[in-house]
Image: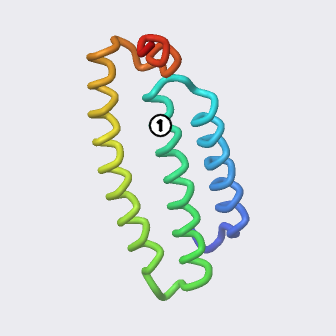
């Protein structure tokens, strides 16, 4: 089933996810939305790794190993980021970046 789908479809999906994540990272002011955008960027990289591994080196599992490592790093990053966001929310009662900058001064 996977081999019937051309690699261009995976690359288009990955590119769309990456640029949606970059757009969300640059435009959103909420820390949680920025975290979700970062996760979207990391998942687009995972799709690329699996797709290239499947189509270039079908007999090896190097791409899947890198994806598992990337998922583990993303989970750790999300846990630390959520802890930071909770501490910021407790201190400033907001997760909006613009409001936090105003409250600092």
Residue 94 location (% of width, % of height): 39, 14
Which secondary structure, mark 1? helix
Q: Which residue is mark 1?
A: 36
In this rendering, the answer to whether 41 lies above or below 52 is above
Residue situated furthest front in the rendering: 105
Residue 17 as seen in the image, left or right of residue 104: right
Question: Could you say where residue 39 lies in the image, as x and y percent from the top left?
Answer: 47, 45
Which residue of the protein is positioned furthest toward the bottom in this rendering? 59
Q: Nearer the viewer, residue 31 or 18?
A: 31
Compared with residue 51, is residue 79 higher up or lower down, i.e. above or below? above
Among the 4 quarters of the image, the one containing residue 83: top left
Residue 4, x across and y down, in percent: 65, 71
Q: Nearer the viewer, residue 16 or 28?
A: 28
Tell me where residue 22 sits by quadrant. Answer: top right
- Say which residue appears at 71% left-offset and 56% top-offset: 12
Q: Is 23 drawn above or below residue 92 in the view shown? A: below
């Amino acid at each position: 089933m996977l081999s019937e789908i051309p690699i261009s479809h995976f690359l288009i999906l990955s590119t769309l996810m990456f640029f949606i994540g970059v757009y969300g990272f640059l435009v959103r002011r909420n820390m949680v939305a920025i975290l979700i955008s970062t996760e979207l960027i990391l998942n687009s990289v995972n799709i690329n790794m699996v797709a290239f591994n499947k189509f270039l080196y079908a007999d090896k599992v190097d791409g899947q190993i890198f994806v598992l490592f990337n998922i583990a790093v993303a989970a750790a990053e999300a846990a630390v980021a959520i802890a930071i966001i909770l501490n910021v929310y407790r201190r400033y009662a907001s997760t909006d970046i613009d409001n936090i900058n105003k409250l600092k001064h």
